[in-house]
Image (cartoon, rainbow, N blue to C red):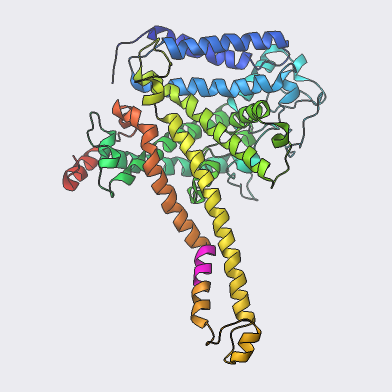
Amino acid sequence: MARPPVNAILQPLLFALITLLFALSLLPGSRPLLKHTVFLVLTAVTVYCVYATRNEDLQMDFTNMPWITLNWLAVANIVWTSGKQDVSEVFRKKEMGRKPKKGIEKGESVVEAGESVVEAGESVVSAPFFTRFKWAFDLYASSRGIGWEHEPTAYLPHRTPSKDSSTNPRLDFLLYQQIPSLVRSLLCYTVGGFLMQLNPMFRPNATLSVSEQPWWLQPTVLGQILVLGSVLNILHVVLATMVVFALGAPLEEWDTPLFGNAKDATSVHESWRRAWHQLLRVSATGHTNRIASLVLPQSFLQAPRGTMKAELRGKFKLFTAFFLSGLFHLFGEYALLFPAYASFAPGHGSIWEKGGSYKFFVLQACAIVAEDIVSWAVQKIIRLLEGIIQDEIASPPSRDASSNAARGLKACQPKSKDVTLLKLVHTCLTSPSIRATVGYIWVGTWFTVTLPLFTGTASEHGVTLMVGNVPGVAELAKFARSQLAVE
């Protein structure tokens, strides 16, 4: 879809300038004043780009504005974390073939792989400008921290291991990871595009909202997850393959898949923690820790795990992280809904009323808290059932009334049926397959209900449909709509 552009001619220049400033803000060897000055310039250019420019292509603005703001969030985390220290003193690359160090000591060396290697014992601060710029760009580009000391290894997808007898790990990387991942993404993109075009919500000028659709049609909104995930994964696969084979980048920095296994999505928490990408985890964690240190009392910050204050601290960080993610995704909706120079002020018709991104993400935190409560209750019930079953098995009621009275039991026949029922309930609550099945149903239902908050604004402008429009599949979806009477 097209619309009158506003300062659109400046957008390519601004995007290039912002990308350059991202790296310059993290340049090792810069004085603290210079580092923070460059970051302030970056912030000003970012605000101008988001607030005062509009492209005639809605899809471009809807994609680019969140990309700019989320990258700004990541760079801000690095700049503010390093503070007055040099960036290279706080953020360090892992040495190839070594495990990540538990801590970062000031003055340690940075070792890079590739042509521009900083030798062990030599600081990157004293390296030539190009080497320092490459180091800064690598830090900016590695939003998940892969290859760096701050890499959140426990939350990243597992790499596909090479064969023990393989003499060419890069070829294994291509054949056994990249190509299968690309094929799966294309398949998911096709299926997701079909589901999206089956749903009236994703067609321009749609009059049938998700809540008004038949119950069996509503889950087709999940096609948006398949399409969005597929597009991101295809871009990652192509980029990783090009960088590894064309530029000779270290395989260890690019062989981690972008997404985890869909089988892990047995809860909303695990969906975000394991299955979805972790591009925002490092920056969101840094900012939430910083906000928590400013807002929460010391008694909460220093509370050991397992205490009530520690639980409240964790929930505060959870809601803060999701709110920040929703807030910076909101800029994509802002670019769709409002002309340039529109106010962010609250009120009727404002972005806070029309936008749905921050509502969607905050609801995810609510769902995770609800899951924690249900999980706690289920564990209590399981332990209670185990105690009752063990007591019934160890000392069942006797036929002798006097014996039962001495043990405080009623005179009755052994409760074999009751014990069997309790065992059945216990098996259902503890069975991994049953728990996983219930979890998948819950996750699918939850995202069916909440996802329209995230995609509704874009779909009203026909933006989402552009992403999921697959040749051939569109005709099939049109035929299916006519047969199902959902036109």
Task: Tell me the chief SS of the magenta region.
Answer: helix
Is any atom of residue 215 visible in this view? Answer: yes
Residue in the picture at 46% in, 31% down: 235
Tell me if 389 is positioned left or right of 223 in this view: right
Residue in the picture at 54% in, 9% down: 44
Q: Nearer the viewer, residue 444 or 179?
A: 444
Q: What count of labels does the image hold? A: 0
Is any atom of residue 271 visible in this view? Answer: no
Q: Give coordinates of residue 93: x percent, y percent.
A: 71, 29
View extreme (bottom): residue: 400
Is 325 colored magenta in this rendering?
Answer: no
Q: Nearer the viewer, residue 92 or 363?
A: 363
Residue in the picture at 52% in, 82% down: 415
Asked which quadrant contains residue 381, the reply is: bottom right
Q: Give coordinates of residue 244: x percent, y percent.
A: 58, 31
**Which image quarter is the C terminus in?**
top left
Q: Give coordinates of residue 323: x percent, y percent.
A: 51, 30
Is 426 colored magenta in this rendering?
Answer: yes
Instruction: Say if 228 sits above or below 163 in the image.
Output: above
Asked which quadrant contains residue 34, the reply is: top right
**Which image quarter is the N terminus in?**
top left
Residue in the picture at 57% in, 12% down: 42
Q: Which residues are magenta?
A: 424-431
Tell me if 197 is positioned left or right of 178 in this view: left
Q: Give coordinates of residue 37: x percent, y percent.
A: 64, 8
